């Protein structure tokens, strides 16, 4: 595709696998990107010369990847994206809009313009190509683990001589009661939105993580599309407790403009509520939310929560023993930091610098822990997985979300089942479940496979005992499971089996996912329950 005007003539190729060989071992490889083909005439009456995009150091985005592999990935991405661009251009042309495909830097707004233009026409989403997937592929990430494009088919495909806007992959969940229309705006990661109409909850297709302008624009457009297609005007707006999420700010602005009541829903309550919505549970239920992170009612990051949920309300019965996050959010990307925090907690802080000598910040982190500087606490299960992976040396820095947990699961699968560690956890009267003894054992474990299997087995045993205590104490037989950590099959199967063996009814997601894509449904369920109880 012509990169100057998008007219479809010419080709853009990556040329020269290694036009500059490194002069010395470890030197930089370079590559060149240029538009191939002679100057060409354009249907709209101008010409231009092929463009040379210059050279750049190879390996910047793909440390350790071969030049040939990187070029192949780039070629594949360009080929696919050229196809998508062509389809989008044909669609716009059918609406008498000429699309100028400017050469510009990322963040210049051209994609936002395309999204808004097509959304304004009829609410369809353009095919945006796979730049994010491409970048991740360049970093060596398994593409199968990445979020899929939000449209299941090309939305701009033609059928019977007319432009067909493909049916979005919205999910309709039947609710056991009717109520006023609710708009729920979801969380930050894996965002979806949900609009209720009567006794139906319509959950949008996956919008994605709200850190990109495209995803935010798509959230705006999706709310408009859902409300238009369902012909509803929301009367209640629900959102996450976190004040800085784009979805929260969108909800607040939407409600303020229309004078609507707002309902803030705690993240893990929403995880459990989504499962309740799918199973029509209107009575009391125990909720076990095992998750990365969500803002708790006490202002700290939660993620390993045992809840009592009934109607629109919930109570926090217990949580995982808090772990420190040295460096805050950075600790979520660097499991070695979580391992360092555990070592410090175990009174073995002097091992940090030696064990993580490859990490330039090891001594600083040890000092931060010593002085309790920038070390917020969390009850997150995801960080517990990270700590285990860091202690076993299987993943010190994560290349993508949940990489440490995925590696641990793979290792455990390969190793095979083991018995839980005797005395590997403690359950306090206060409801805190503490896996410190297990983590101490992992810190001394030389066999990562055995350690990973031991971690999974002991985690499931401790969680099951914790839930059984609460079920007995509160005379509840229903347990709802939610949160992204339940993507882990070993944990899910082992824990479900143990709970079922105790006579508990285990409720899990059905048509939704356990992750944050279900949050909007949970928020809608809580808001609808509040409305029924006259609390809104
Ligand atoms: Zn979550």
Image (cartoon, rainbow, N blue to C red):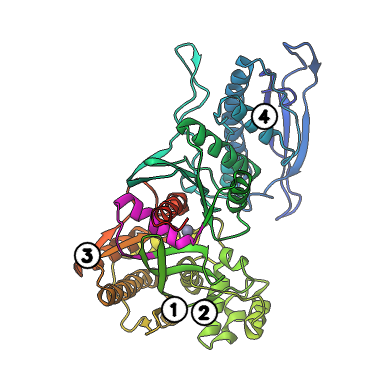
Q: Does the magenta portion include 281?
A: yes
Q: Earlier in the sequence, mark 2 or mark 3?
A: 2
**Mark 4 / mark 2, whichever is N-terminal:** 4
Nearer to us of marks 1 and 3 is 3
Crowdedness near tag 3: few (<14), some (14–19) or many (≥20) residues, C-alpha within 10 Å? some
Looking at the image, is mark 1 or mark 4 earlier in the sequence? 4
Instruction: Report, in whole angstroms, how far the alpha carbon at label 2 lies from the one at label 1.
Output: 7 Å
The region drawn magenta spans: 264-288
Mark-to-mark CA distance, 3 and 4: 57 Å
**129 versus 258 height, above or below:** above
Is 365 covered by the magenta stretch?
A: no
Sooner in the amino-acid sequence: mark 2 or mark 1: 2
| Quarter the N terminus occupies | top right
Q: Which residue in the protein does label 2 denote? A: 342
Q: Is residue 201 visible?
A: yes
| In this picture, residue 238 sits left or right of residue 459 | right
**x and y percentages locating residue 181 in the rendered image:** 45, 43
Q: Which mark is residue 240?
A: none
Q: Secondary structure at mark 1?
A: helix
Above or below residue 6? Residue 65 is: below
Q: Which residue is mark 4?
A: 13
Residue 128, quarter of the rendered image: top right
Mark 1 Cα within 10 Å, few/some/many (few <14, many 20+)?
many
* Mark 4 → mark 2, Cα distance in angstroms: 49 Å
Give the label, 4 or 2, closer to the camera. Answer: 2
* Residue 439 disc label: 1
For label 3, the residue is: 500
Mark 2 nearby-residue class (10 Å; few <14, some 14–19, many ≥20): many
**Is label 1 within 8 A of ligand 1 (CB to nearest ligand atom)?**
no
**Image position of 360 (left or right of 507):** right
């Amino acid at each position: 595709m012509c990169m100057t005007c998008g007219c479809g003539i010419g080709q853009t190729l990556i040329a020269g696998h290694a036009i500059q060989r490194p002069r010395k071992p470890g030197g930089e490889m370079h590559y060149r990107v240029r538009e191939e083909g002679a100057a060409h005439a354009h249907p709209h009456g101008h010409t231009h010369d092929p463009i040379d995009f210059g050279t750049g150091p190879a390996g910047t985005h793909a440390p350790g990847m071969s030049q040939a592999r990187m070029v192949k990935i780039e070629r594949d991405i360009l080929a696919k994206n050229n196809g998508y661009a062509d389809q989008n251009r044909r669609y716009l042309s059918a609406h008498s809009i000429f699309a100028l495909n400017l050469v510009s830097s990322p963040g210049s707004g051209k994609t936002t313009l395309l999204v808004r233009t097509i959304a304004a026409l009829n609410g369809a989403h353009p095919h945006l190509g796979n730049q994010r997937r491409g970048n991740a592929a360049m970093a060596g990430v398994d593409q199968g683990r990445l979020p899929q494009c939000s449209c299941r088919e090309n939305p701009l495909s033609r059928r019977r001589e007319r432009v067909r806007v493909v049916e979005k992959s919205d999910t309709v969940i039947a609710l056991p009661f009717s109520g006023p229309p609710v708009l729920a705006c979801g969380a930050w990661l894996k965002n979806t939105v949900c609009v209720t109409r009567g006794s139906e909850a319509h959950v949008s297709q996956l919008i994605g993580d709200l850190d990109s302008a495209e995803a935010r624009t798509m959230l705006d457009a999706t709310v408009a599309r859902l409300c238009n297609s369902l012909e509803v005007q929301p009367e209640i707006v629900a959102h996450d407790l976190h004040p800085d999420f784009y979805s929260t700010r969108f909800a607040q602005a939407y409600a303020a403009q229309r004078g609507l009541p707002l309902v803030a829903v705690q993240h893990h309550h929403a995880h459990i509520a989504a499962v309740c919505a799918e199973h029509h549970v209107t009575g009391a239920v125990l909720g076990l939310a095992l998750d990365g992170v969500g803002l708790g009612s006490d202002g700290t990051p939660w993620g390993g929560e045992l809840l009592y949920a009934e109607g629109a309300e919930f109570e926090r019965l217990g949580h995982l023993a808090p772990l420190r996050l040295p460096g805050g959010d950075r600790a979520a990307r660097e499991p070695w930091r979580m391992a360092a925090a555990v070592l410090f907690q175990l009174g073995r802080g002097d091992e940090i610098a030696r064990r993580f000598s490859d990490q330039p910040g090891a001594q600083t982190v040890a000092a931060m822990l010593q002085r309790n500087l920038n070390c917020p606490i969390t009850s997150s299960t995801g960080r517990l997985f990270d700590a285990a992976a860091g202690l076993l040396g299987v993943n010190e820095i994560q290349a993508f979300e949940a990489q440490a947990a995925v590696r641990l699961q793979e290792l455990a699968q390969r190793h095979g089942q083991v018995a839980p560690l005797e005395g590997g956890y403690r359950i306090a009267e206060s409801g805190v479940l503490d896996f410190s003894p297990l983590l101490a054992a992992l810190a001394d474990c030389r066999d990562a496979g055995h350690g990973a299997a031991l971690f999974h087995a002991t985690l499931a045993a401790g969680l099951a005992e914790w839930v059984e205590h609460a079920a007995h104490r509160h005379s509840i037989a229903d347990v709802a499971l939610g949160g992204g950590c339940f993507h882990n099959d070993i944990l899910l199967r082992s824990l479900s089996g143990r709970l079922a063996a105790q006579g508990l009814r285990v409720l899990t997601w059905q048509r939704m996912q356990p992750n944050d894509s279900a949050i909007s449904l949970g928020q809608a369920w809580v808001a609808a329950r509040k409305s029924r109880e006259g609390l809104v």
